[in-house]
C-alpha cells in the first residue's frame, strides 16, 4: 500500500491548509491523521471510520475537519484557524480490515508562523 500525502506548507497563524492523502488501494477501514514534533510522540489528530464516524483530538476540535472520498481512496484534513502549536509533521494512516494491518504515509510538514 502506498500513501501519497500532500498539502503541507507554511501558513500564518489564523490561516488554513488542506491536507490530502491518497492510497494506492481501496481502504475499507478507518483513515486518519496524526502529527509529530521533534522530541515528542506521534499523536492522533483525527480519524474517520468507513461509515463516516469522526474522532478528533481536543486540541483541534472545531478547527479541523476530516473527510474521506472512498471512490478516490483519499482522506482529507481541512485545517482552519491554524495556530503555531499546530506546527508538526502530519502523517496519514489507513487500516485495511481484510489484512488487520495499518499503514503510514511519509508525512507532510505543516509550519504555522506567528
Image: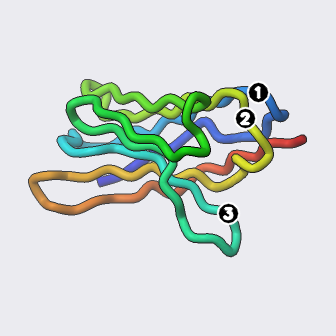
* Residue drawn at x 84%, y 33% as measured from the top left: 12
Q: Are marks 1 and 2 in contact (CB under 8 Å)?
A: yes
Would you say 84 lies left or right of 31 here?
Answer: right
Q: Quadrant of the N terminus?
A: bottom left
Q: Which mark is residue 15?
A: 1
Q: Give how far apart the Cα atoms at labels 1 and 2 are.
A: 6 Å
- Looking at the image, is 92 positioned above or below residue 81? below
Q: Give how far apart the Cα atoms at labels 3 and 2 are.
A: 16 Å
Would you say 47 lies left or right of 86 here?
Answer: left
Q: Position of residue 18 (x, y in %)?
A: 59, 30
Binning the other alpha carbons within 10 Å of mark 1 as few (below 14), some (14 to 19) or many (20 upward) gives some
**Of the image marks 1 and 2, the number of the one nearer the N terminus:** 1
Q: Which residue is mark 2?
A: 82
Q: Give how far apart the Cα atoms at labels 1 and 3 are.
A: 20 Å
Q: Are marks 3 and 2 in contact (CB under 8 Å)?
A: no
* Residue drawn at x 15%, y 61% as measured from the top left: 100
Amino acid at each position: 500500500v502506498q500513501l501519497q500525502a500532500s498539502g503541507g506548507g507554511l501558513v500564518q497563524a489564523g490561516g488554513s491548509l488542506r491536507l490530502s492523502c491518497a492510497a494506492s488501494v481501496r481502504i475499507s477501514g478507518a483513515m486518519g491523521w496524526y502529527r509529530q514534533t521533534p522530541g515528542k510522540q506521534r499523536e492522533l489528530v483525527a480519524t474517520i471510520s468507513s461509515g463516516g464516524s469522526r474522532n478528533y483530538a481536543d486540541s483541534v476540535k472545531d478547527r479541523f475537519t476530516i473527510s474521506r472520498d472512498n471512490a478516490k481512496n483519499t482522506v482529507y484534513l481541512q485545517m482552519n484557524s491554524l495556530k503555531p502549536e499546530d506546527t508538526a509533521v502530519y502523517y496519514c494512516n489507513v487500516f485495511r480490515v481484510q489484512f488487520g494491518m495499518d499503514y503510514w504515509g511519509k508525512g507532510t510538514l505543516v509550519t504555522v508562523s506567528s
